[in-house]
Image (cartoon, rainbow, N blue to C red):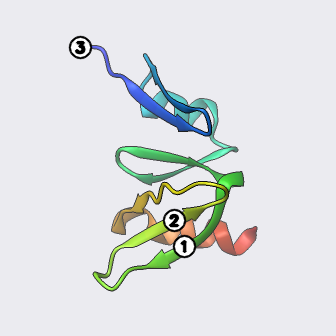
Amino acid sequence: DHKYVTIIHRSGETLIDDTLKELEREFDKAFVRVHRNALVAIASIERLERLPSGQYQLHLKDADYRPVVSRRHVTAVRELLSKL
């Protein structure tokens, strides 16, 4: 089975025939895993917010999209943001 990834960018969306794992390996310095189904460009991260529900989401520069950060990845995202 082929795995497809939807890339969300300023101009819209693009469907590519790569896995997130492949993209994560290839672009490990530019992107961070925030969920089992999502990578986010580090340069686009504005801040991490905890919601009243206890979940975390990222605010991205110049974007309305707010990706959810899973509990499994929140510590790594916090550490990364503290270094920026």
Q: Which residue is mark 1?
A: 48
Left or right: 56 as drawn, with respect to 46: left
Label 1 – label 2 distance at C-alpha: 5 Å
Badge 1 element: strand
Which residue is at 67% across, 54% downward?
44
Q: Is residue 61 above or below residue 1?
A: below
Tags 1 and 2 touching, CB below 8 Å: yes
Please identify the quadrant where the C terminus is shown.
bottom right
Camera-side residue of 65 and 80: 65
Question: If the image is split into quadrants, where does the N terminus sit?
Answer: top left
Q: Nearer the viewer, mark 3 or mark 1?
A: 1
Circle 1 residues within 10 Å: few <14, some 14–19, many ≥20: some
Q: Amino acid at mark 2?
A: Leu
Q: Residue at x 38, y 80 (%)?
A: 51
Residue 15 on image: x %, y %: 44, 22
Q: Which mark is residue 1?
A: 3
Label 3 and label 1: CA atoms lie apart by 35 Å
